[in-house]
């Protein structure tokens, strides 16, 4: 990868290209950021909070301009892009409000005359970021890192240079000089890790293994948010109308291009047919079209290769016994469109049982009972999130305790909340983002002891 290229997902047209950096450009950027960070870290956290509030205001003012670029490069509907930016604004204001208290030094009683901990920045944090949420994913890591006193160097995905460039302008235009975008070629990432003090990565499990290995080689703290194949379990006493609506919203929002979406719909026999009928009706009702059209409810995928990989998974599932209830056909026109697709009777021979599915394709897995539902939920390399729908919330919590995941949502699709930690286990990564737990990932918790 020697260039960053924007492609209009709705037409397939290349609209912008910029070259990757040289090693000298990377070194110069790191030097600038380290100088700026020394001043930034020396400021009171309340001053850093004030700067972040100015960033939130600037992001809010330019939300429509930024959303248009995300729609262009990613293919998400305009309303979805605006929602991403609005949530990012909330994130900034959340940390600006709470961080001064959360980062305050704490006394901890011991036999010393005074003892406790302080929270100090690690230095410069490198982030290797994905394409599907080019605003939210970046700020989800950067805002807590910045307010803790760190500098932030972001390597964006190769397909979103326009949105990434504008976001950088907004942050730096707010007076925050400790944030910059690194237009790195893939072969320069190890040098960037070596020159940084910590690493954040969001993306595929395969690339996450590489990033973790490089971070480990250079003894740099890392946080990885990787793939997901979230189970969505529907029990016999569930409200089926609510469950079908929530499942459809989770699976098909942002054209299914979310690690945290419901991907494997696990249903018990008592309600399987009724649930599948309701869910498939929601899928068929979606209107595939240009992401800028207000009438569109399902936009295109971000790239041609993503659509081809998704279709290959669908064909494999059908070949191995899954039933295609709707969708599953590649469109022949311009753009990277793929219809809402429902696969019923998915079984372990199908790739979609084991692999992450990144697009508007839902896999229905029919199980014999609740115990098998839990076994199937855990029969995946991933462990990001899970949902359980049942009228008996006590039973749902007991079942949820048996699921290997970073989060369990009861009678709600999996999502992220600023106030709660976000992250996974197994091949979904390690570390946490959001909430106070995300704030503490990139600080040195320094112990103090005074005789």
Image: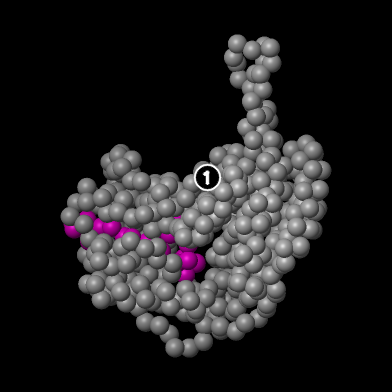
Q: Is residue 306 above or below residue 205?
A: below
Query: From where the camera sits, is residue 281 visible?
Result: no
Q: Which residues are magenta?
A: 251-272
Q: Position of residue 70 (x, y in %)?
A: 61, 69
Q: Position of residue 117 (x, y in %)?
A: 64, 26
Report the front residue among 434 and 305: 305
- Mark 1, residue position: 432
Res. 156 image quadrant: bottom right
Report the front residue among 33 and 81: 33
Q: Position of residue 4 (x, y in %)?
A: 65, 72
Q: Residue furthest front?
A: 217
Is residue 47 within the magenta segment?
no
Res. 123 image quadrant: top right
Report the front residue among 10 and 22: 22
Give left or right: position of 401 versus 35.
left
Residue at left offset 80%, top offset 48%: 36
Give left or right: position of 438 versus 377.
right
Secondary element at tag 1: loop
């Amino acid at each position: 990868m020697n260039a960053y290229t924007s492609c209009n997902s709705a037409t397939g047209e290349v609209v912008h290209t910029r070259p990757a950096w040289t090693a000298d450009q990377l070194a110069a950027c790191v030097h600038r950021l380290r100088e700026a960070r020394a001043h930034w870290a020396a400021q009171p956290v309340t001053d850093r909070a004030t700067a972040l509030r100015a960033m939130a205001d600037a992001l809010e003012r330019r939300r429509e301009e930024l959303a248009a670029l995300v729609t262009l490069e990613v293919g998400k509907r305009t309303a979805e892009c605006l929602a991403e930016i609005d949530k990012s604004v909330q994130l900034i204001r959340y940390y600006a409000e709470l961080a001064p208290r959360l980062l305050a030094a704490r006394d901890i009683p011991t036999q010393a005359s005074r003892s406790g901990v302080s929270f100090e920045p690690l230095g410069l944090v490198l982030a290797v970021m994905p394409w599907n949420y080019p605003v939210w994913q970046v700020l989800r890591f950067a805002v807590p890192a910045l307010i803790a006193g760190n500098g932030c160097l972001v390597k964006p995905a190769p397909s979103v240079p326009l949105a990434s460039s504008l976001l950088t302008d907004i942050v730096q235009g707010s007076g925050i000089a400790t944030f910059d975008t690194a237009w790195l070629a893939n072969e320069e990432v190890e040098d960037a890790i070596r020159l940084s003090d910590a690493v954040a990565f969001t993306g595929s499990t395969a690339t996450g293994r590489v990033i973790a290995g490089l971070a480990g080689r250079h003894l740099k703290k890392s946080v990885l948010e990787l793939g997901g194949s979230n189970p969505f379990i529907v029990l016999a006493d569930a409200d089926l109308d609510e469950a079908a609506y929530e499942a459809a919203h989770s699976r098909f929002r942002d054209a299914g291009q979310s690690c945290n979406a419901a991907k494997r719909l696990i249903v018990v026999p008592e309600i399987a047919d009724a649930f599948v009928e309701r869910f498939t009706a929601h899928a068929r009702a979606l209107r595939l079209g240009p992401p800028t059209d207000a009438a569109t409810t399902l936009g295109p995928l971000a790239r041609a290769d993503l659509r081809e990989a998704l279709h290959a998974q669908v064909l494999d599932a059908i070949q191995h016994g899954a039933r295609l209830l709707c969708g599953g056909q590649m469109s022949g026109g311009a753009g990277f469109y793929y219809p809402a697709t429902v696969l019923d009777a998915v079984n372990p021979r199908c790739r979609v049982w084991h692999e992450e599915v990144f697009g508007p394709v839902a896999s229905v897995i029919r199980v014999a009972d609740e115990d098998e539902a839990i076994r199937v939920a855990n029969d995946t390399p991933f462990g990001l999130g899970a949902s359980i729908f049942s009228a008996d919330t006590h039973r749902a919590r007991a079942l949820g305790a048996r699921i290997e995941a970073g989060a369990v949502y009861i009678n709600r699709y999996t999502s992220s909340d600023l106030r709660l930690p976000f992250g996974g286990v197994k091949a979904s990564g390690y570390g946490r983002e959001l909430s106070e737990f995300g704030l503490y990932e990139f600080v040195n918790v320094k112990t103090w002891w005074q005789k």
